[in-house]
Image (cartoon, rainbow, N blue to C red):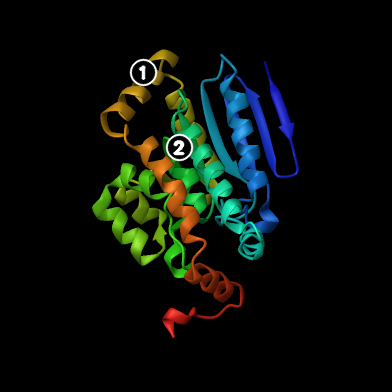
Amino acid sequence: MNLSHTSQILTVEFENGIGRIKINRPEKRNALTRELIETLLKAVQGLQQRPELRAILFTAAGDVFCAGMDLGEMQARATAMDGKSQWQRDSEIYSELLSEIFTLPVPTIVCLQGPVLAGGVGLALACDLIVASEAAFFSLPEPMRGITAAIVTPLLTYRIGAAVASGILLSGERITSQRAFQLGLCHAISPPDQLTQRTEELLKAILTGAPAALAMTKRHLQRCIGSHVMEQLKESIGISAEARETEDAREGLAAFLEKRKPDWCR
């Protein structure tokens, strides 16, 4: 059965056992709002209900895969009377999305045509396989904005280990797709004009595996080395929300929007 659904911010297609989810906010660099995160979660849950589902592919429109959380919405949260509860809810929904993707019984692939930052990195890391354009890069700049990538951290350490993850998390430095491939963050990199072909080749290779065998492989892998991730994602919700309530967070956001250095760098 084929399915196609397009909203203002998301496109969902289902055909021949493959679910395709495309983020569609290129004018905002595909930044994540609460609405977009909730829509992504519903799309993933909807596809999971289809017994013929074999794999899910995540893509995004425009030149940037995802710039992280929407700064306009973050600014609104910072000035809201119930800001703390709003931060908590945002963190809960985001963590739930990553958990849902991470525990899917079918293989998941994300195709990065361009940069992926902050919360977008978590979305990519929740997937089983990452294919990136040579023009893409990874960045976790949260400390430079006075906050922490708390919810991304469990997935990052799961993928590449604490020693390498600490350098990425603390420095905020950009990681090119080539470097990401060397670190094991990316599973394949490609010239921009061959990215779609490379992604489809990988998807085709995965689908040569039996559905039950692929599901068992995923479950066993997570039991071997990822059993702690779900618990850590839940614990990270409070840390993420708490960090956004600090004076550093308010100063970091203001400095970024005003295109200046934050006070702690002066």
Determine which residue is flagged by label 1: 216
Number of callouts: 2
Report crowding for label 1: few under 14, some 14 to 19, many 20 or more residues within 10 A (C-alpha): some
Q: Dot 1 lies on which element? A: helix
Residue 13, label in figure: none
Q: Position of residue 41 (x, y in %)?
A: 59, 35
Q: Residues within 10 Å of mark 2 (few under 14, many from 20)?
A: many
Marks 1 and 2: in contact by CB < 8 Å? no
Residue name at image x 56 percent, y 14 percent: 51
Residue 232 falls left or right of residue 80: left
Question: Is residue 249 positioned above or below 32 on the image?
Answer: below
Which residue lies under the disc numbered 2?
127
Q: Amino acid at mark 2?
A: Cys
> Which one is nearer the viewer's eye here, 59 or 245?
245
Left or right side of 180 for 127: right
In terms of sequence position, does the residue under pointer 2 or pointer 1 come before the other? 2
The amino acid type of the residue labelled 1 equals Met
Q: Name the residue at 50% across, 67% down.
A: 249
Relative image position of residue 207 (x, y in whole percent): 46, 21
- Residue in the image at 43% along x and 43% along y: 125
Quadrant hosting residue 126: top left
In the displayed structure, 146 sits above or below 15; it is below
Q: Is residue 1 left or right of residue 207?
A: right
Quarter the N terminus occupies: top right
Q: CA distance from mark 2 to mark 1?
A: 16 Å
At which x and y percent is residue 36?
Answer: 65, 45
Confirm whether residue 5 shows in the render: yes
Quarter residue 67 falls in: bottom right
Quadrant including the C terminus: bottom left
Q: Is 256 rendered above or below residue 19?
A: below
At a point 32% along the width and 31% down the height, the residue shown is 227
